[in-house]
Image (cartoon, helix red, strand yellow):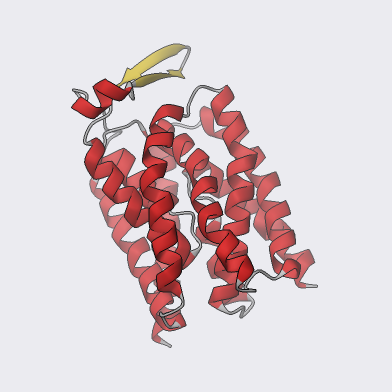
Amino acid sequence: MISLVLLPISVIAGFIGSILGLGGGVIIVPVLTLGFGVDIRYAVAASLISIIATSSGAAASFLKDHLTNLRLAIVLEIGTVFGAMSGFLLSSSLKSSSLFLCFGGFLLFSSVMMFRQKKDPRAETNHPWSEKLGLNSKFPEKGEWIHYKVANVPFGLISMYVAGIFSALLGIGSGIFKMLAMDGAMKIPMKVSSATSNFMIGVTASASAGAYFLRGDIKPEIASPVALGIIIGAWIGARVMPKLNAAFIRKIFIVVMIIVGIQMIMKGLR
């Protein structure tokens, strides 16, 4: 019965996740824990599987639309993979209430940071590492190519390490943190940040999902409908996202994080 209910919810989560670069985990974990009473560790494990599905469903379409910065994604994944391994080692020593509070607090912090950023940022100059690695690129918008530069690459790598830790702990794909780092610190356009995050979250989740599987935390009756729904929703979202403007994406992003963050904190306090 739970599988039939989870499938349409997962489609919606995949749609939102692919548009915002979140991976769907930010929706699925609260739904499973708050709505169905699933233990947060099982919810995190199922979410990691869905994140891999989201990345697979949306990344190909974003690459085709020339929105994903593939070279930047490969560089930043160095930080996220090491962070994911560190996060898994921490997960066994934390209580469920701590995970809820950590999840909720992180979402509220993220929403505040996104709200403070009033416009789509653009770096004026490349960071020296960006120049050497050729990380600057371009993307299509309204029939023309928009060129952009990449700033603050070292801070981006450090942020990705922290993002990897959150991914393994909370099963969220760490898309939120990646979006904040690329959008705010590295001054990359919002659409490119979202598409590149979608490409990266699958690799990040894979680094910790295998460990959760070996520990027996992945339940097929939960993970299977979630993954299927996420794939469908991510494909739809990938087709729609290029037609949306960055300001609209940012507003959805902030609203989703505030609502879910408050709910998770209340759950942790109880």
Dividing the picture into quadrants, the one containing residue 56 is top right
Name which residue lies at 43% across and 88% down.
Answer: 270
Q: Is residue 41 above or below residue 54?
A: below
Examine the rendering and report whether any part of residue 257 can be seen.
Answer: no
- The one nearer the camera, 217 or 187, is 217
Name which residue lies at 51% across and 62% down.
Answer: 171
Q: Position of residue 12 (x, y in %)?
A: 63, 52
Q: How many marks?
A: 0
Q: Position of residue 164 (x, y in %)?
A: 40, 55
Q: List the single residue furthest toward the top.
A: 144
- The one nearer the camera, 118 or 197, is 197
Name which residue lies at 30% across and 33% down.
Answer: 120
- The one nearer the camera, 268 or 200, is 200
User: Which corner quadrant holds the N terminus?
Assistant: bottom right
Q: Position of residue 59 (x, y in %)?
A: 57, 35
Q: Is residue 82 above or below residue 69?
A: below
Q: Position of residue 219 (x, y in %)?
A: 70, 71
Examine the rendering and report whether any part of residue 190 can be seen.
Answer: yes
Q: Is residue 116 above or below residue 243?
A: below
